[in-house]
Amino acid sequence: MDQNTASKKLHGFFKTILQPPETHSTPRTAVWKRNKATLWHYAPSSKKYKIPVFLVYSLVNQPFILDLCPQNSLIEALTNSGYDVYLLDFGIPGYEDKEITMDDYITEYIQKGVKELYITPKQKK
């Protein structure tokens, strides 16, 4: 490898490290929040399916991996296929969350997030 090629590769490496790609490129709306958790809705441009996709991502990792950038996004692919997509993002856990149990995550976050999908605005009031 000549010096010019090596220099270009090194420049590209540092450009990538110093300017990470923009994530969360698919338009979304927060439809429910509880503590640090947020239920995001990604609406399809043309809805084809009645039943939505409900994604629950890891408690440890961050869910932006599902919506990295255009043409590299699971969420974008699902919405382009006509699915309503909902993503439950637990947020970043901290020391103050040490008392939350797995049962709490299931009953207070996942179950209530799913119920939020099926409650009409009239029922919320």
Image (spheres, helix red, strand yellow):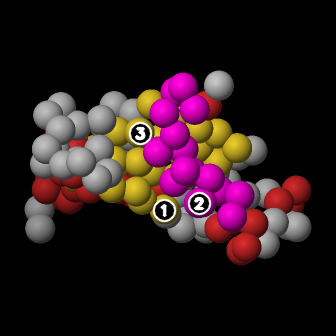
Q: Do the CB atoms of the residues marked 2 and 1 lie less than 8 Å apart?
A: yes
Q: Is residue 92 left or right of residue 13?
A: right
Residue 110 in picture, x, y percent from top left:
59, 60
Amino acid type for the residue under numbered disc 2 = Ile
Q: Residue at x 34, y 39 (%)?
A: 42
Disc number placed over residue 56 in the picture, else none: 1
Amino acid type for the residue under numbered disc 1 = Val
| Residue indicated by mark 3 | 41
Image quadrant holding the C terminus, namely top right
- Residue numbers of the magenta segment: 107-123
Dot 3, crowdedness within 10 Å: few (<14), some or many (≥20)? many
User: In this view of the protein, which residue sits in the foreground, 105 or 121?
Assistant: 121
| Residue indicated by mark 2 | 110
Amino acid type for the residue under numbered disc 3 = His
Q: Is residue 116 magenta?
A: yes
Real-space CA distance between mark 3 and mark 1, rounded to the nearest whole angstrom: 12 Å
Residue 97 in picture, x, y percent from top left:
83, 60
**Tag 2, which secondary structure?**
helix
Above or below, 63 against 76 in this view is below
**Tag 1, which secondary structure?**
strand
Looking at marks 2 and 1 on the same chain, the residue that comes earlier in the sequence is marked by 1
User: In this view of the protein, which residue sits in the foreground, 41 or 13?
Assistant: 41
Q: Is residue 98 left or right of residue 89?
A: right
